[in-house]
Image (tube, grey):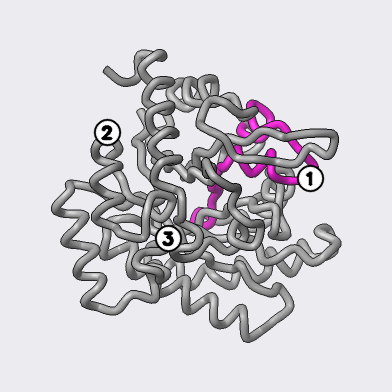
Amino acid sequence: MFRRAVITDEISQDLDRALVIAKRYGLEGAELRTVWDKQLYELADDQLDQVEALLSKHGMLMPCVAAPVFKCDLGSESDYAAHLKILERCAELGRRFGTQLVRGFTFWARGDFQADLPLIVERLRGAEDVLRKTGAVLVLEYDPATSAGTSQKLEQVLAQVASEHIQALFDPGNNLYDREGESPFPDGYNRLKPWINHVHVKDVVRVGPSGKPESVVIGQGEVGFPALFAQLVADAYDGWASLETHYRKAAAIPEELLHRPYGSAFSEGGEEASIECMEAWNGIMQAQGLLP
């Protein structure tokens, strides 16, 4: 049975507040992206001590460091070097907080994916020394703003990289955010199944003639989460699934913040929306007999 978490800045930049709410709805894990208006890897030592104390206080585990590794320019040597350092820092933090997993991406999209694929693979293989040294696993997310923005493209990347240290983060909501609009389940899931080490949970509908994607309450979108949760159980997936709400009640998150989630502007309105999603998630799991 998989374990459940939330990306805390989808609730609040106040980590204590986010953990109280997550615990109230039966979640066991806190995936950290931004806390107190900083990326986890930007926090000072005393702030990291506070993070550790708060996780311990609430009995919460950290399933993954939700880092922005390789959300950078594919062709920039300086960007690449900087992100290798971010990866190493996040891997060290993951080890401190009890997780091997660090979230990563496949560089900003810049045109022809097939033409860029060899360099993407080369860059990712260049991260293996850091991953081997730290014992970390880089879980790649197919964000639509990045080069491998679909599960079909990420499948090609992972097959060519062929590394036990570089795996997949399955985010079915992203399938619907991408313009190619691929089916999240079962198609996207089955394509990435051999590499899935982490899962994000957000639901999306496509609105109007243009098919504009909008995040909604879990279970009210097009992902098909009841079937996906059942399949994860049937496949004996024993990793984590983390709520990445993205839904907001008052107004949708601006596109730039979706691509670069950061700080209070991103978290605004997240608490109420995340509570709705956690209630809905619990309801789905209870209906399937997966929660009491």
Q: Tags 2 and 1 in contact by the CB under 8 Å rule? A: no
Give the left or right position of residue 228, taking residue 188 as reference: left
- The residue nearer to you, when weighing 129 against 73, is 73
Instruction: Name the quarter where the C terminus is drawn.
Output: top left
Q: Quadrant of residue 151?
A: top right
Q: Please tell me which of labels 2 and 1 falls first in the chain.
A: 2
Which dot marks residue 179? Answer: 1
Give the left or right position of residue 159, taking residue 194 as reference: right
Which dot marks residue 26? Answer: 2
At 64% from the left edge and 26% from the top edge, which residue is drawn? 186
Circle 3 residue: 33
Q: Residues within 10 Å of mark 3 (few under 14, many from 20)?
A: many
Q: CA distance from mark 2 to mark 1?
A: 35 Å
- The residue nearer to you, when weighing 226 against 34, is 34
At 57% from the left edge and 26% from the top edge, which residue is drawn? 220
Q: CA distance from mark 3 to mark 2?
A: 20 Å
Q: Residues within 10 Å of mark 2 (few under 14, many from 20)?
A: some
Q: Position of residue 197 (x, y in %)?
A: 47, 44
Q: Quadrant of residue 4?
A: top left
Q: CA distance from mark 1 to mark 3?
A: 25 Å
- The residue nearer to you, when weighing 16 against 113, is 16
1 drawn magenta: no
Specify the amino acid type for callout 1: Arg
